[in-house]
Image (tube, helix red, strand yellow):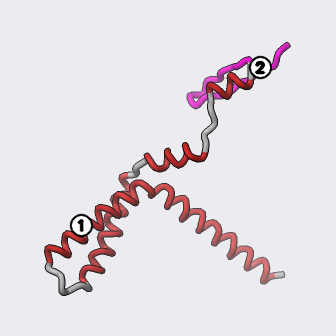
Amino acid sequence: MATRYSKRQIDGSVEHYDSREEMEARNPSTSGSEIFEIIATSFNPFLAIVGFIIVGIAALWFASSIGSWPTWLRFIGVLCAAVIGGYVFGKLGNALLMLAIALIGIGIVYVIGTFVWQAL
């Protein structure tokens, strides 16, 4: 009796295959470049708005220190910076959010490790 291979699909159904090669041909694994492509093509409008506001406020603060430029030029500079910042946050926001969560997790582990080290 031959070995059969089964794989559960996203919709909950189970597909059966007669060989491992057939199963891998129907369900290719996701490579690193495909994951990067998924992240690069995703756009999060909420993070775009957050980025627009954050970069806009930072650019406004920076532009207020430049008194020699005309007002219209400062306005256009702040608007362009906010739009570009919103776009970057929208495109890379998910990756930046995961990076921030990872850094917070590393910090928590470091603090706990420091407390344990001091207690010993």
Q: Quadrant of the N terminus?
A: top right
Query: What is the x, y in percent for residue 57?
Result: 30, 73
- Residue at 73% across / 17% down in the picture? 18
Instruction: Establish if 114 lies above or below 50.
Output: below
Residue at the far top in the pictured view:
1
103 or 84: nearer the eye?
A: 84
Query: Badge 2, how many Cα within 10 Å: few under 14, some, many 20+?
Result: few
Q: Say left or right for 8 vs 78.
A: right
Inspect the image, locate mark 1, and give the three-letter code of the amino acid beneath it: Leu
Query: Badge 1, how many Cα within 10 Å: few under 14, some, many 20+?
Result: some
Q: Work out how far the residue at label 2 is from the one at label 1, CA to CA, in angstroms.
A: 60 Å
Circle number at residue 64: none
Residue at image mark 1: 79
- Residue at 45% across / 57% down in the picture? 92
Q: Say left or right for 50 vs 21.
A: left
The answer to if 13 sits in the magenta stretch is yes
Query: What is the x, y in percent for residue 75?
Result: 19, 72
Span of residues in magenta = 1-18
Query: What is the x, y in percent for residue 64?
Result: 24, 82
Q: Quadrant of the C terminus?
A: bottom right
Residue at image mark 2: 4
84 or 112: nearer the eye?
A: 84
Q: Secondary structure at mark 1?
A: helix
Query: What is the x, y in percent for residue 78?
Result: 25, 71
Instruction: Establish if 71 lies above or below 8.
Output: below
Based on the displayed image, in which of its 4 quarters is residue 24 positioned? top right
98 or 92: nearer the eye?
A: 92
Instruction: Establish if 10 lies above or below 120.
Output: above
Tag 1 or tag 2, which sits nearer the N-term? 2
